[in-house]
Amino acid sequence: MKKLLFALLLLSPALGLRAEDGHQLWLRPHAAVPVTVVVPAKNSALLATAKQELQQGWQGRAGATVTLTLKKDKAFKYDGFRLSAQGVQAATEAGLLYGAFELLRRQQTGQSVAEEVSNPSYELRLLNHWDNPDGSVERGYAGKSIFWRKDSALVVTNRDKKLWQEYARANASIGINSSVLNNVNASPMILSAEYLGRVKAIADVLRPYGVKTYLSVKFSSPVLLGGLKTADPLDPAVVKWWRGKVKEIYQQVPDFGGFLVKASSEGQPGPQDYGRTHADGANMLADVLKPYKGLVMWRAFVYSPNDKDRAKQAYNEFVPLDGKFRDNVIVQVKNGPVDFQPREPFSPLFGALKKTAVMPEFQITQEYLGHEIDLAYLAPMWEECLQSDTYQAGPGSTVARCTNGSVYRQAHSSMAGVSNVGLDTNWTGHDFAQANWYAFGRLAWNSSAKSAQIAEEWLKLTFQNAAGANQLAASAADWNAKFLTPVAQLMLASREAIVDYSMPLGLHHIMSATHEHYGPGPWWAPPKMRADWTPPYYHQAAANGVGFDRTKKGSDAVSQYHEPLASQFNDPATCPDEYLLWFHHLPWDFKMKSGRTLWDELALHYDHGVQQVRQFQRTWDQAQPYVDAERFAVVQNKLRSQSGNAVLWKDACLLYFQQFSHMPIPAAIEPPM
Ligand code: GCW
């Protein structure tokens, strides 16, 4: 039977099963008893959603009343709400919806409801989908796009609508209130009348869940779609074209959110093609969107092949523009200065832009953290970034506080996550990758939330009383001890394990380019390839040592950080081990804080990562009685693959680096195969 189930599961994409037919994410049905929900005397789609959710899920006394009250109160910020024994109060309808979901979450995770106010840290909490109009998803590992498809692309079916509704509901349950529907490497087609028709259909389904629709746009759309000769942002004909297009969009989607733009970046067209700045480009679009209250999210992910240090470029280009952006522009900055690596120090732009709204961009999809194969719980990585102190306005100027409006008065505050959602039956490719979607929403709502608490919450919602589980748990205490605690520990250790077996001690960008960034490739450097796309540019391994010298004597990237960080990072004696080879090129026999040589320390980290994954396998095996057969088997298989791949990383990297170090593999670790 188990085998049959497993075979069916493997076949499911072929059978045409899609996300909405399959897993319920963290929103699993529970038996509900009748509840009378009093809503304000107002007919609204959002409140109807809130009411429906409570009626489906709330397990109060029969006939109990939950009151949803709209009221003004100084205690509320954005869509914040107050919970009490009587129900929910908020200043906005969306706030009442979030409060309703919070009540349900409390109930399902066994937490009490005390009178308390919960306000979101960020005004906008959004997903960026890197989905293309042909249905493919850039860096997507969960199947094709839920929004677009190649064949009969623009016909909207009931099935599409059902799927979008489930997606919107999942977002609403964790406070995500905005979605960018297409890839930042944008096709100009998205702005064609045909595609805008589908955008409208999607927006109509997302709206009752409080999710606003945004689009990524290609800067040269006036040329490619409009037939103009130029896309120069200062050309009146170009401005006119955008004005017409934006009007057309708002006719279809009256509450449209705005544009996300990747411009003059990685070969994408942009204002620099016409000798203009990022501010010229962003402001032009911002002015066109302003009458509709639309926003521009302008990405700062820029670097060029001629740079000596890619990590420095965004800061160099954007800091001189501080103060030059309109107030409806937000500059969107990846968490680290290079590119979503397993570990990077925070981008020095956080806190350095003082007069510009800045928003962090995190990658939920696991481009550099094991795709859909490796189990990587990413909340600890995001928490690490959000809690990093930039010192830009004195101690305590964390990345979170510099971006959520606490340190600088920015007109808009926002946090974006590159989505990991696709058509796979479990939505995210790996069952545990659902936790990253969940955690992103929870951190965007509360930037001080703790990864551990989010993991526990998600595990309870997703696995407790899972239908089909072999219910060995005698009691909640038993379930907590045998499943919750060990599996939460596994999750919390998972990202560090990947850092260890792939890029420890500050190594970065040494993955394989030929396997779409999965697996090791420190040697990869084909002739004529752009140097800044090849791993040797980043690790600089040679007989004299390893690591990128970003000290004052090297590229001087350290000086982009505020003191005391600049000095701390500049000195290998004070630089944290986890960033050592990010900032320093050090001899192989460099003496580490542990007393070991750098070479030995490196080897131990690689080995530790491998041992950790083996431990994860054991933990999961022991969790079997508490998990339904399908999810148990799938995760077990993935861990098995991950374990082999971790060994590959360790062996490949150690044998590669050994050519330069000429030092023996330490006896304490498992020798390369
Ligand atoms: O991480 C890199 C990815 C590209 C991506 C780019 C970006 C959308 O490899 O696939 O393009 O970053 O963030 O723009």
Image (spheres, rainbow, N blue to C red):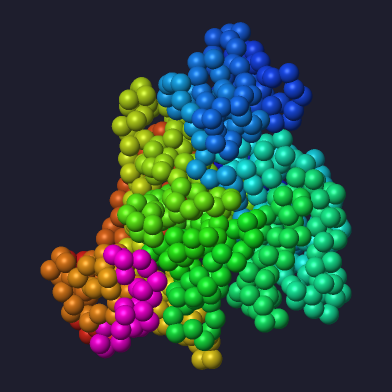
Most foreground residue, 224 or 524: 224
One can see residue 519 in this view = yes
Any part of residue 665 in sight: no
Residue 669 image point, x, y percent: 21, 66
Q: Quadrant of the C terminus?
A: bottom left
The x, y position of residue 519, in whole percent, is 44, 69
Q: Magenta span has 563? A: yes
Magenta-colored segment: predominant secondary structure: loop
> Where in the figure is residue 591, as x and y percent of width and height?
16, 74
Identify the residue at image location x=48%, y=68%. Answer: 339
Residue 565 appears at what percent x and percent y? 31, 65
Q: Which residues are magenta?
A: 539-566
Q: Nearer the viewer, residue 273 or 160?
A: 273
Is 274 displayed left or right of 240 in the figure? left
Identify the residue at horizontal 75%, vertical 22% (top origin).
42
User: Measuring 44% from the left and 74% from the top, which residue is drawn there?
Assistant: 311
In-image side of 98 versus 337 (left or right): right
Image quadrant where residue 150 sits: bottom right
Q: Which of 314 and 66 lies nearest the eye of the viewer?
A: 314
